Image: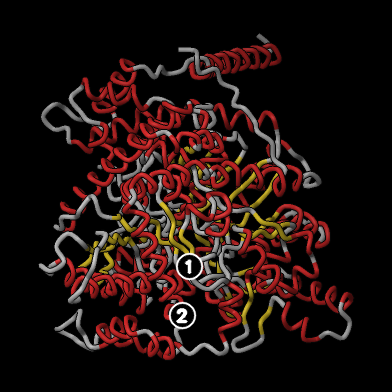
Amino acid sequence: MSKTDNKKTQKNSAKIKSDKKQEGKEKLWEMIEDSYLASDKEALQKSFAGHLEYSQAKTRYSATDFDCYKSLAYSIRDRLMERWNDTQEGYYNSNEKRVYYLSMEFLMGRALCNNLINLGIQEESYKALYELGYNLEELRELEPDAGLGNGGLGRLAACFLDSMATLQLPGCGYGIRYAYGIFEQKIENGFQIEKPDNWLRFGNPWEIVRPEYTYNIEFYGTVSENNEWINTRKVLAVAYDMPIAGYQNDTVNTLRLWSSKATEEFALECFNKGDYIKAVQEKIMTENISKVLYPKDDIEPGKELRLKQEYFFVSATLQDILRRYRVNNKSFDNFSSKSAIQLNDTHPAIAIPEFMRLLVDKEGLSWETSWDLCVKTFAYTNHTILPEALEKWTVELLGKLLPRHLQIIYEINRRFLEKIKEFYPGDTDRMRRMSIIEEEPVKSVRMAYLAIEGSHSVNGVAALHTQIIKEKLFRDFYELWPEKFNNKTNGITQRRWLKLCNRRLSDLISKHTGEAWVTDLYELKKLIPLAEDKKFREEWRKIKEENKRDLAEYIKKHNGVEVNINSIFDCQIKRLHEYKRQLLNVLHIITLYNRIKSIFPGEFVPRTFIFGAKAAPGYYMAKLIIKLINSVAHVINNDPDVGDKLKVIFLENYGVSLAEKIFPASDLSEQISTAGMEASGTGNMKFALNGALTIGTLDGANVEIKEEVGDENIFIFGLKAEEVNDLRDIYNPVDYYKSNRHLKQVIDMIYDGYFNQEDKDLFKPLIDKLLGGDYFMLLADYASYVKCQEKVSLTFKNQDEWTKKSILNAACTGKFSSDRTIKEYADEIWQVKPVKPKGNFNKE
């Protein structure tokens, strides 16, 4: 055989092998793509048993309940995977515009039952487990809450992801895979004690690591004369994905979380020399980036770590978005028509200079082209008007950690100020006010201003909040760009906050109105005529009583206190902050206590006050308020004169799963922030959805709740936002203290140590702050609050009337579904359309 013939033979042989290999791969993918797991009882049992044996490696002698929880989770995840893959393939095939939601927090809660509901297999799963000797409700309690968020910001993000998937929008959430949540709260001697929230201790069965999506993230270094960022320190960002299921529509979107890894595991040379600490020091420092949610930032290392976290996750995210875009697109001409990026508050605002760096420095695009794409792509949601919550980073820190980005920020600002000079010639004060760089007291970068300038949309999260940011907070920017500003009132997902957490009420509503409300909350309007139906009111009232009994059992088990289920369950559950005014609630509680203790107490409607709140570890006053609540609870709950008329309960370690127990049992929702300071609130919506009546100021979304439920079905008190502003300069809290004898008695009791005999001076700082300024105007609103609470008690005495109001509150919550909010974002900001997955899930 000639050499030529031999080469031909080898080439043909290689082609045959290649063809066979390709045929084999095709067979593999057909096996995967053309078959789907069944979700009937027997199929679920088979999956459960299989994972217990093969994934958990357990026998009848070694299997624990936690093994069974994980086996169930893996069984459900298998069914999510099929839909997940088909959803993502559908997105790539359609090449439709996608939305990317960037947030430092995603307060997801437990995933198991939420996924069962959204897959439509909760009943089958319950039966499958019951026949195998296990209880679904008991197994779900073994799942830890994902430690990925803290408060309303993170829970909103979680609701939004649920709604995006339910509306079949091609969306993806991006954040950080924190190894530890903010903290596990313990109450010891009435004080908050922070313990590590090691939620990943035993792994997370819902996540998939994606090592193929690993990116270099750079810090420190210098910038060369030709603007090249050099001599940097590198960190790896590794992707971990969690599936986000839509409600019974076969769409499964993605929450992609980044975990920091060292470029080298350890320094072998140091290890061999016996310097074991130095050998792993770099690894430890690197991986701290994704270690803890919100590190304490009242010290310089904490501030630096916080900024590192923010840049780490946005840099990885933007690299990932650009990679995904390149799959179907050769140039960046269509980038903004294929990608929408939403910044959830100012934390991800460093994404704007990073986007510019990637396009200008890495992709070689011109500044003008890159900036045009930036503004068309990004949108910014503001969540606060409190000055301390509007992030600023010192120029010194930014220049040290991200020197190239500081250069880019200065260039963005230079070009912006040129525009201001052109529009407002000679107005140097306006230029100073609007500059991204704040010159005094410390030269800093105003991240909110950076977000506004780099985005095409700026939205508030409630009508009042949006009005405030237009007229006050960002007035100069609104005057320049009125078309950028819009309102998107927050919402909540009814799948978790009614169907999942309040099954009794959910079943009653579905029985009388059908199931359509699960995806169209306006359908609850059908409850309005039922409020006049006596039998229906009795059923509604009975469900509330059963829910209260469940919560009372939880309180007895965890707090050792028996509560009266016929009392008003008066609930304030939210992050502890002075503007949210938990302290005002305490002043009222002590007022009621004094009435009971008085010589002529009169008729008294029993109350159980329920608090749930975490205070930031470095927030001294908030932690002192927690101690006061517990001290007041100790006195009242142990006073024989009080009996079951009044109880005060502080439930430790408040989070999503605890909230799911409280909302269904609540009678009264405390939304009592200083008017004009709460951007929106979403707890108010969850309470109303579960039939609680609201007592509140005209703040945040309370204003819109009042509009929806009607003046007669809500309890409003206190100063309005404009009245707070008008009073600010002339306000003297001592005048209120001296003129109201009930208030004076309460203040004096706290100041004199009545509730803490061991250390009578403990609570003096709280009273000193109230009488010395009372910035949040508790004393100004006290009398109005107490009077409004008397109206609450009077109304509660007429249980039939109260139940009517409860039904009407739930019936009128349609506006407050996150489905409505997300549809508005999709239509008015993102311009994204639904995309259906390619699969056929009836094949089994």
Residue at image point 38% right, 33% down: 536
Residue 266 appears anywhere in the view = no
How many marks do you count on the picture? 2
* Disc 1 packing (10 Å; few <14; some 14–19; many ≥20): many
Residue at image point 35% right, 79% down: 620
Q: Quadrant of the N terminus?
A: top right
Name the mark on residue 492: none
Residue 73 point in image, percent of width and height: 33, 33
* Disc 2 packing (10 Å; few <14; some 14–19; many ≥20): many
Give the structural element (helix, strand or loop) at label 2: helix
Residues 828 and 699: in front is 699
Cα–Cα gap, marks 1 and 2:
11 Å
* Residue 752 sits in quarter: bottom left
Residue at image point 64% right, 32% down: 91
| Amino acid on which the number 1 mark rests in the picture | Phe
Q: Quadrant of the C terminus?
A: top left
Q: What colour scheme has been applied to the protein in the rendered image?
A: secondary structure
Residue topped by disc 1: 717
| Amino acid on which the number 2 mark rests in the picture | Ala
Kindly check if marks 1 and 2 are in contact, taking CB atoms under 8 A apart as contact: no
Residue 587 point in image, percent of width and height: 33, 75
Residues 577 and 236: in front is 577
Residue topped by disc 2: 780
* Residue 406 sits in quarter: bottom right
- Mark 1 or mark 2: name the one nearer the start of the chain: 1
